[in-house]
Image (tube, grey):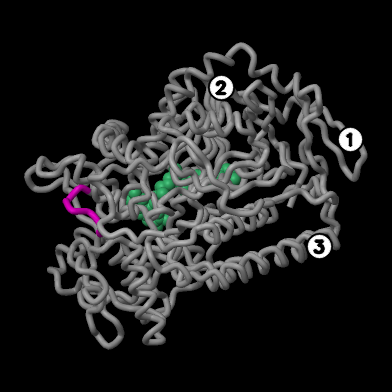
Amino acid sequence: MDFGAPCLRGASFSAYFAPGLSSFRSVDASLALCQASNRFLTIKAAANGRISSHQNGRHSRTRLDDGSSTKYFDFLVIGSGVAGLRYALDVAKFGSVAIITKSEPQESNTRYAQGGVSAVLDPSDSVENHMRDTIVAGAFLCDEETVEVVCREGPERVKELMAFGASFDHSEDGQLHLAREGGHSHHRIVHTADMTGREIERALLTAVKNNASISIFEHHFALDLLTHETTLQDGNTITCHGLDTLNVRTKEVVRFISAVTLLATGGAGHIYPSTTNPLVATGDGVAMGHRAQAVISNMEFVQFHPTALADDGLPIKPKSRENAFLITEAVRGAGGKLFNMARERFMPLYDARGELAPRDVVARSIDDQLKKNNEKFVYLDISHKPAGEVLGHFPNIARECLKCGLDITKEPIPVVPAAHYMCGGIQTGLSGQTSIEGLYAAGEVTCTGLHGANRLASNSLLEALVFAQRAVNPSKDHFQRVQGSYRAVDEAREWTRPLESTAILEDSQMEEIRKFTAVQRKSLQQIMWNFVGIVRSTERLEIAQRRLEELETSWQDHLFRHGWKPNMVDLEVCEMRNLICVARVVVRSALSRRESRGLHYTTDYPDLVESRRLPTVLIPAYWNSGLVNRLSTGSVSSRAVKTTQEFQPKTPVQA
Ligand SMILES: Cc1cc2nc3c(=O)[nH]c(=O)nc-3n(C[C@H](O)[C@H](O)[C@H](O)COP(=O)(O)OP(=O)(O)OC[C@H]3O[C@@H](n4cnc5c(N)ncnc54)[C@H](O)[C@@H]3O)c2cc1C
């Protein structure tokens, strides 16, 4: 759905696998996602390089005269999780910074992280061990260079966090207490009991609030990137100049013009009905990037956390939750065992590593048990451990369960898988650069190549920290290049922006639009859960694809019947547009992968296929050979698989 948002669109996308750095092979038909239908305002680049708008064929150019709602900052950061905050603190040394965040500043996936940050800090551990664990968990689809960079730089980033004031648990010998989680061969998880994310968010947010160069714009919903296309000899380049936002409280559209923009909008858990992610995780960054024609990778790899608290199995049922409560991996790391309802320990039947197998294996094993036994949950038991130890390590989980009438030191915890983490996203290079000039990205919104087909536990806070820091120097360089000119850009180019306020709608119309959107949002989530879950098939993915298209059409029709205008904006409606976009990208990417690898398991192609051990890369169709060449030579971000012999899978199946 198009809201007249200020980015170039209308071109179709193609699904490609990128088989190495030198060539590309199209494996799929054109992907026409999030396209503007001609009912809507569409933005086109005029021949002179300016942006003009057309509605129903009529030319309706709009200048931004009201400078009051246009703000200028050297650096714009979208998102106030670990990635956005960490980056903001560094770039604030070079210029003014605005952090845009759609809710309260602390509301983010970061805040809910329990287990911790993985880093090689024990003398008996090594970077090579951490790399191997990451690559094995990632089903050998990881980019080895990225993995090495992250594992090598991780310890330094953790020490910096402590310098920013984050307080982590220490052992009696005064050393950092390092926990162990599923998929890790060593103890390497730095943590603050089971509330690590809350502590990191607190420390970084405090530092940000004390920094005079940083302004936080809370309750500002990022609508769309302001982009502009330039024709160069070797192909066109898209440049990002900032962002339009909706002040959710005042309903005002506020434009931010910047030299550099960092996308750090986190995950997309809410494309599923049951997710550990808070409500803010609606995939806005990937959808915005997609509309702006950024390269996007590996969206089929959605991680389901094996052990979210199963409310159905609790003595006292909690009121309906916005997000599922997570039972951290560390419970299994500390010796927690999984049982089915018949009290049989089932993990050893599936994997020799038992409960310490990577998440995808554990989630699929639980899914299999639930289907075989027609049950709603399994049990995770830690009650055999001393109560003091359990309460010391997992006070938050113990408290939450006790509220629901369950004492985890005495009884097993009912658990069920829930959508947890998006491994795919906006493709970045080793410095967080995207395929769009002036746009960098860090954190869960990205695909850096670290996670491959499955994220290793506690590697995502680490990835966000490493890439937020790596994006600083190139951002500074870009800022210094355009420092003298970027403020004038809004004068030189013109972007339409949402013109009509929803205030012109009757209350009853708006109520109906919101009510219907909420119902459709639930339907979308159910489609994804039923047809694009832990175990997939081509037929079910095709059903999902069809139903998502139908849902989008009927949703749009309903809105327009109730007075909606193409250039209106509203939080719930814009989130829905993004959820549809991301869901469709996930389904299309999943259909493109004709093998089972990591988090993508399909009954039609149940084996690993070595010749398909390639990332799924969505490249905008406007890219010509010059741009593909730039991608392949690395001057535009490209993370292709270069896994060496040492990390090769043991028994690959040949196509
Ligand atoms: C329950 C839970 C437990 C986890 N445990 C761990 C763990 O132990 N270890 C680990 O490594 N990882 C863990 N993760 C994953 C990890 O927390 C996230 O991947 C990481 O915090 C992402 O950080 P981020 O900065 O990229 O995004 P987030 O922390 O999600 O921040 C995104 C920010 O963007 C804002 N935003 C989004 N869309 C918009 C928009 N349109 N306009 C304006 N603002 C917007 C959000 O409001 C938020 O401020 C866990 C995740 C969850 C949900």
Depth order, front residue of 566/136 = 136
Give the SS element for disc 3. helix
Asked whether residue 166 appears in the rendered view, the answer is yes
Q: Residue 385 location in percent, x, y? A: 14, 69
Q: Earlier in the sequence, mark 3 or mark 1?
A: 1
Q: Which residue is mark 3?
A: 557
Give the SS element for disc 1. loop
Give the SS element for disc 2. strand
Relative to 129, is 438 above or below? above
Q: Which residues are magenta?
A: 182-188
Q: CA distance from mark 3 to mark 1?
A: 24 Å
Q: Earlier in the sequence, mark 3 or mark 2?
A: 2
Residue drawn at (36%, 53%), measured in percent from left and top?
A: 455
- Would you say the magenta stretch is mainly helix, strand or loop? loop
Relative to 198, is 237 above or below? above
Q: Which residue is mark 2?
A: 74
Disc 1 marks a residue whose amino acid type is: Ser
Mark 1 Cβ and ligand 1 under 8 Å apart: no
Asked whether residue 252 appears in the rendered view, the answer is no
Q: Earlier in the sequence, mark 1 or mark 2?
A: 1
Q: Residues within 10 Å of mark 1 (few under 14, many from 20)?
A: few
Q: Which residue is mark 1?
A: 60
272 in the magenta segment:
no
When asked about the image quadrant of residue 419, the answer is bottom left
Disc 2 marks a residue whose amino acid type is: Asp
